[in-house]
Amino acid sequence: MMYHDPVLLSEAIEGLSIDPSGIYVDVTFGGGGHSKTILEKLGGSGRLIAFDQDEDAVKNQLDDERFELVEANFRFLKNYLRMHDALPVDGVLADLGVSSHQFDTGERGFSTRFDGPLDMRMDQSVKKSAAQVVAEYDEEALERIFKLYGELRKAKLIARELVSVRDTESIDTVEKLKSVVERFGPKNKMAQFFAQVFQALRIEVNDELKALEELLIQSVDVLDEGGRLVVISYHSLEDRLVKNFLKTGNFSGKPEKDFYGNLIRPLKPVKNKVTVPTEEEIKRNPRARSAKMRVAIKNG
């Protein structure tokens, strides 16, 4: 099964600063690219626990006694690490977003390039698909999704149109959704417009931002002192949450201080500047273009 080249691979491994005898977690296993490289850096006593909720990713299981794969969403990080007797850990890696395999599989409904069912579920065992969101949410809820998660200016008009059309026709395929909303997109930026519409629905279906918040909070609990968190994000909504949490210890981005005037933040950014892919990597792997990586260390 073909999966994409892991994005920012050498930078992510450097960010983890791997101790060969340490315990590491790859919370977005996917094709296993990052995990394989982490295992190469680990010695005989090192451990790697990976998470993935996608049954396609589970087929990429690695045959290594130091490796364990948890078939679950990373929002359950702390519970599963406790179950696997793997606390505390020395590093956590999260490569967020949709894998190339998911984008390239038309029947998953993630991509605007192929027609297929309007699905978008990362965990195929959950019931709520993008088609159900479009069919069942009221106009106000749809507007909120497109405004918040898609950052679409015409969110209200798009929501109203979907509610109007679904009364007489099913909106349950990629092409049908595109045909209903395309008149609200700028003609010269239609690909970007469709991407924003799909992103909004995907985030809602998979509860992605809430899951990310839970991951960031739990990473503080599971990391050992001096342990590292590496997060690669692909759109501004994710990156803003990560940036705020690393800088201020909360998601609002407003610094809070203790009685002595010290900033309350459990993680400290390794560097304030975000890491982005090189031109060479983008040329080799165009999907790396929007990637941003942030690294933090747990305060002692």
Image (cartoon, rainbow, N blue to C red):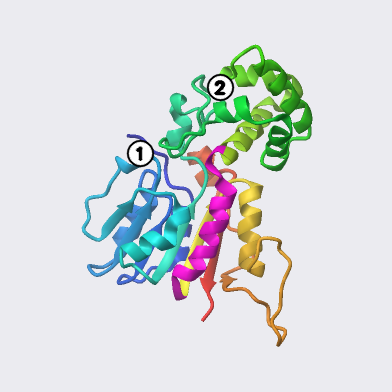
Q: Is residue 209 magenta?
A: yes
User: Which label number is shown at residue 55?
Assistant: 1
Q: Earlier in the sequence, mark 1 or mark 2?
A: 1
Q: Secondary structure at mark 1?
A: helix
Q: Is residue 71 left or right of 252 when viewed as pictured? A: left
User: Which label number is shown at residue 174?
Assistant: 2
| Quadrant of res 133 | top right
| Quadrant of res 55 | top left
Q: Is any part of residue 186 visible from this angle?
A: no
Say if 69 sits above or below 151 in the image.
below
Name the dominant secondary structure of the magenta segment. helix
Say if 257 sits above or below 192 in the image.
below
Amino acid at circle 2: Val
Amino acid at circle 1: Glu
Q: Quadrant of the N terminus?
A: top left
Magenta residues span 205-225
